[in-house]
């Protein structure tokens, strides 16, 4: 049974990876789907996000990384996959995801959402928090995989060159 783990992953965090590893215990394979959300300003390009994710998951079997500019449910239908994975850190995530699940069901009643509650050590991690810390040149290594740390270091080096 296949599943899709959609998100902006801007950047991917250790919390995302925790959800992925737990999902691989339930599903035979998982596609991490980098979704371009027009309502969000991405900090990293799709290519950069995919590079960071591919590097972060290179030791995991049965994981593929892909992207879409369209709707996740359209991607799922095109690939004949009916299972979507989502992580929940708190009540705000839950409320948002339930609403999103209802929208998906309107488009495709056969879509199944599987929710993974964040492990305690990852509940406070968000891509926004990582970006704030990264922009302030703080240590982010305990929150993100090494590929993200490298990308932020490269970005810091570029900023130093321009100032």
Image (cartoon, rainbow, N blue to C red):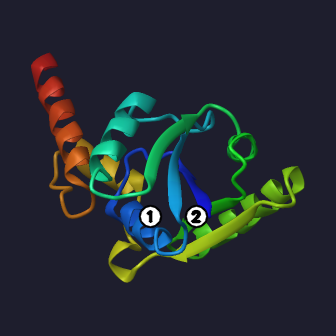
Snapshot quadrant of residue 112: bottom right
Residue neighbourhood size for the residue with mark 2, other residues' Cα within 10 Å, grouped as few (<14), some (14–19), many (≥20): many
Q: Earlier in the sequence, mark 1 or mark 2?
A: 1
Question: Is residue 4 left or right of 103 when viewed as pictured?
Answer: left
Q: Which residue is drawn at the image coordinates 62% and 31% (left, top)? A: 69
Q: Position of residue 14 (x, y in %)?
A: 32, 63
76 vs 49, left or right, is right
- Residue 145 — which label? none
Q: Quadrant of the N terminus?
A: bottom right
Q: Position of residue 157 (x, y in %)?
A: 12, 29
Tally of numbered tags = 2
Residue 144 locus on image (x, y percent): 27, 57
- Disc 2 is placed on an element classified as strand
Task: Work out whether 16 lies above or below 89.
Answer: above
Q: Is residue 35 left or right of residue 46?
A: right
Q: Which mark is residue 86?
A: 2
Does the CB distance between marks 1 and 2 fall below 8 Å? no
* In the image, farthest residue toward the top: 162
* Secondary structure under the numbered disc 1 in the rendered image: helix
Of labels 1 and 2, the one closer to you: 1
Foreground residue among 154 and 92 = 154
**Cα separation between marks 1 and 2:** 9 Å
Q: Which residue is at a point 16% across and 24% down the rendered structure image?
A: 158
Quarter of the figure with the C terminus: top left
> Where residue 32 sits in the image (x, y, percent)?
49, 50
Residue at position x 64%, y 70% in the image:
114
Which quadrant holds residue 40? top right
- What residue does disc 1 label? 20
């Amino acid at each position: 049974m296949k599943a899709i783990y959609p998100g902006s992953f801007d950047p991917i965090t250790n919390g995302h990876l925790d959800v992925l590893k737990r999902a691989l215990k339930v599903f035979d394979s998982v596609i991490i789907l980098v979704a371009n959300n027009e309502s969000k300003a991405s900090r990293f390009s799709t290519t950069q996000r995919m590079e960071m994710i591919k590097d972060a998951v290179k030791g995991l079997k049965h994981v593929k990384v892909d992207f879409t500019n369209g709707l996740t449910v359209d991607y799922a239908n095109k690939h004949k996959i009916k299972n979507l994975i989502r992580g929940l850190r708190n009540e705000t995530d839950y409320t948002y995801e339930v609403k999103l699940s209802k929208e998906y069901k309107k488009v495709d009643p056969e879509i199944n959402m599987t929710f993974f509650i964040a492990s305690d050590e990852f509940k406070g991690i968000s891509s926004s928090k990582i970006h704030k810390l990264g922009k302030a040149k703080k240590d982010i290594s305990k929150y993100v995989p090494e590929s993200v740390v490298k990308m932020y270091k490269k970005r810091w080096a570029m900023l130093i060159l321009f100032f």
